[in-house]
Image (tube, rainbow, N blue to C red):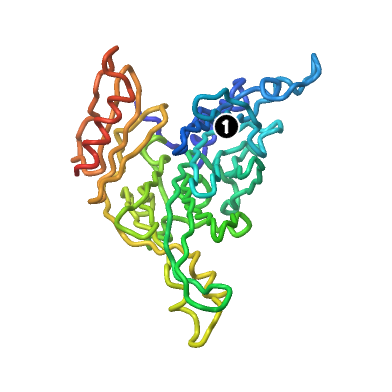
Amino acid sequence: MKKKRFAPLALAAAALLGAAFLAPMPARAESAAVVSPDGTLYEVFPARYGDVVVVPEGSPDANLQVLALRVTPSGQPGHLELVDGTVDANAEGSVSIELEETTRTLFVAYTKANGLMADMHVAVRRDGAWSGQDILSNRGFYLSYNPKVVVTRQSYFDFDAEGMPVTKSRSIFSLVWWEESGPTQARYAPIFVEDGELRVDAVQPWNLNELAGAAGPTDSTGLPLSAYTFPSVQADPSTNGGVIVSFANLATHTQQVLRISFVDDLVKLSPPGATRVPDDVWARGHVPIGRSGGAGRIPAIMDTGALVGATISSSGITTFHWVEGGAMNFVRSDDAEGAVTRRIALRDDLSAEKALRLVRSLAEKN
């Protein structure tokens, strides 16, 4: 039976926060990992404070739930660290991580319970030091969950120290997540690394419905929670450092695909004779430019308590996949009404990882 939403935010609150207060582990807290080109493995996972930091015997802090980072260089022993911002009584939720290879900057996005609400946080590790940032939520009651992050590189034109045009490169962390609030919808925030400087202080979140030019009242009546709360993001190789996102637009009741890019010629936008980029032009360089990449059906048959991933094809078709009931399950945004979930039974010689590779290969062809 589908879990329908009978009152605004009620089911979302139960799904996200209920388990956090009644169970010893945060709701949906799972591990996430990424590996660098030199073979260093970075893993973020739920842990006890006492498992990461030595505390006095019998200390009440020992059982405090935190997020831990294990860093394991290739062929060497690993070591543990605390993820910035997680040492408190508030439960952490879903996690996504990404590594920017040029500056070896690790980006960790996670949700955190805040009373009856849940915030979106990012923690950044660079040169062994941590810094953190809260992502501003929409006004009113809000729940943030299911973050996904990807990093891309963009070449752009700027002025050098002598005022001459020069080509530079910057890294862009693109973060998407779902937020239950007044306009319940997916959100997007870009975070830039420019000239070796991480600009966490200038994070601006955007409502994806508005960025897609299709905003309005949202309604999820009749849809299971899992059908619309898993936005996805991936690099868009057809652009200069852009990304492609897929999200459920509850204003238009469609699964929308949006291609997002950024201005890459700040010199051209500057006044004639300028030798530096004016502040207003610099700000324009951080404003996402969205254009439609397609639309399809919100997967109403995707009724699951499992974590859902997605693969977006170059033609704008989204394939959702999740492991449940001993099988790799998947549905597509171009499925006809009445279509059923496809299932690949898992076996000893057909692991979830292998089945996922098969599903992704199929998704990328369409």
Q: Position of residue 117 (x, y in %)?
A: 61, 40
Q: Residue at x 61, y 42 (%)?
A: 125
User: From what the image shows, is residue 305 above or below residue 319?
Assistant: above
Q: Which residue is mark 1?
A: 17
Q: Residue furthest bottom?
A: 273
Q: Position of residue 184 (x, y in %)?
A: 47, 48
Image quarter (top left, top right, bottom left or bottom right) of the C terminus: top left
* Residue 119 relative to residue 309: left or right: right
* Residue 332 relative to residue 323: left or right: left
User: From what the image shows, is residue 208 above or below residue 117?
Assistant: below
Q: Residue at x 33, y 25 (%)?
A: 353
Q: Amino acid at mark 1?
A: Leu
Q: Position of residue 305 (x, y in %)?
A: 42, 27
Question: Could you tell me which secondary element the residue under label 1 belongs to?
Answer: helix
Foreground residue among 224 and 295: 295
Image quarter (top left, top right, bottom left or bottom right) of the N terminus: top left
| Quarter of the figure with residue 56 | top right
Foreground residue among 38 and 243: 38
Label 1 crowd (10 A; few <14 / some 14-19 / many >=20): many
Q: Residue at x 60, y 53 (%)?
A: 136
| Quarter of the figure with residue 89 | top right
